[in-house]
Image (cartoon, rainbow, N blue to C red):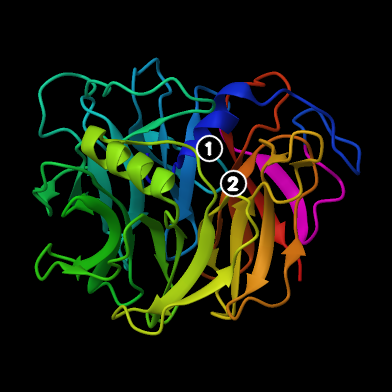
Amino acid sequence: MNRRWVFLFIALTVFPACAGQHGKSDPVGIVSDDRHMGNVTQLTFDGDNGEAYFSWDSTKLIFQSNRNNYACDKIWIMNTDGSDKHMVSPGYGAHTCSFFLPGDGKIVFASTSHMPGDCPPKPKTPNVAGHIWPLYPYDIYSADSGGSGMKQLTRNPEYDAEPVVSSDGTRIVFGSKRKGDFDVYIMNSDGSDVRRLTDRVGYDGGPWFSPDGTKIVWRAWYPETEDEKAMWRNCMENNYIIPMPLDLWTMDSDGSHKKMILKNGATNFCPSWHPDGKRIIFSSNMDDWNEELRVFGHNFELYLINSDGTGLERITYNKVFDGFPMFSPNGKKLAFASNRNPEKPRATDIFIADWVE
């Protein structure tokens, strides 16, 4: 779902518990050679958890979880020390991709709560290797940070999710399946003036504003061969996405000056910006290459890259999934999701670390 991209779901379900590749692991799988990261701390211990994003004052995290035995994800908020976990979405429907508005008094998230039933029905998907990402008919909602006063911002019978709010609070960028394709859109924070920013046939998703709101980074894949184009049409007609490589792109927030900054045949996803506005952190399986099979594997690590595509640097070193990184707005902390706890080898938890330049 959304930034909880298809390859994360592979990570959630099939990654084994392993010790660190280049360092020793403590009881919760923290690897000593993680670059730039100190005091790595596990914050969640129940259920599957993902996409933990900071409040603007850097004191809270909003995230999605199926804890408490829910059949699909709900939205939760906790303090950055892991205390005071409380659910802020409805207890029915599937929910994903939450974010604070500046001032931290309001939140946005994607939800199927406008539909009947506890969870949306899964579309029929093909039998192919890897996890298939069903495109549920999410719409984007806003609410008070306690969960009250929900307001539906989009009314699209197909997928609207992945909302990220600009630093001035006036705009929301998001991923959407409309017009027969999957693209990046932008709208005012009240849901008005929806505009399409990408228009190439293929996948454009996971958009994220730069700290000053002038740029957007996103992930993309565009079919080239006739077989790829036919596969993509089938995906869009049947509301699912199958595993594929993902490149990283940047553009101005009006959709102009699109530039590819990383293309390596791997799956590069969940990009977000460093508070300096010059660097982008993301997750990738680029270093898990199987020479015998000539394919990239399922081990995702965190990387930094300059916004012009230079200066690629690996941040984490282990043999389990690390993804969904976000810097705190003050630049002192890094939150991310990981399968590092060997006691929960098939579940993902939220971690936080001090950022060390």
Q: Which residues are magenta?
A: 30-44
The residue carrying pointer 2 sits among few (fewer than 14), some (14 to 19) or many (20 or more) residues within 10 Å by Cα, namely: many
Label pair 2/1, CB-CB below 8 angstroms: yes
Q: Eyeballing the image, is 124 above or below 9?
A: above
Q: According to the image, label 2 marks what residue?
A: 323
At horizontal 29% and vertical 59% (from top left) the residue drawn is 183
Mostly what secondary structure, the magenta segment? loop
Q: Nearer the viewer, residue 226 or 244?
A: 226
Query: Mark 1, residues whose alpha carbon is within 10 Å: few (<14), some, or many (≥20)?
Result: many
What is the x, y in percent for residue 171? 24, 71
State the CA–CA distance, disc 2 to disc 1: 8 Å
Left or right of 160 on screen, residue 229: right
Indicate yes or no whether the magenta region holds residue 346: no
Is residue 87 toward the left or the right of residue 63 in the image? left
Q: Which residue is mark 1?
A: 8
Q: Is residue 95 visible?
A: yes
The answer to whether 187 appears left or right of 175 in the picture is left
State the residue lying farthest toward the front: 226
User: Residue 134 is drawn in which quadrant?
Assistant: top left
* Quadrant of res 138: top left
Q: Is residue 55 left or right of residue 113?
A: right
Which amino acid type corresponds to the residue marked 2 in the rendered image?
Answer: Gly
Q: Residue at x 10, y 49 (%)?
A: 152
Q: Is residue 83 visible?
A: no
Residue 89: x and y in percent read 25, 36
Of circles 2 and 1, the one toward us is 1
Is 32 a magenta residue? Answer: yes
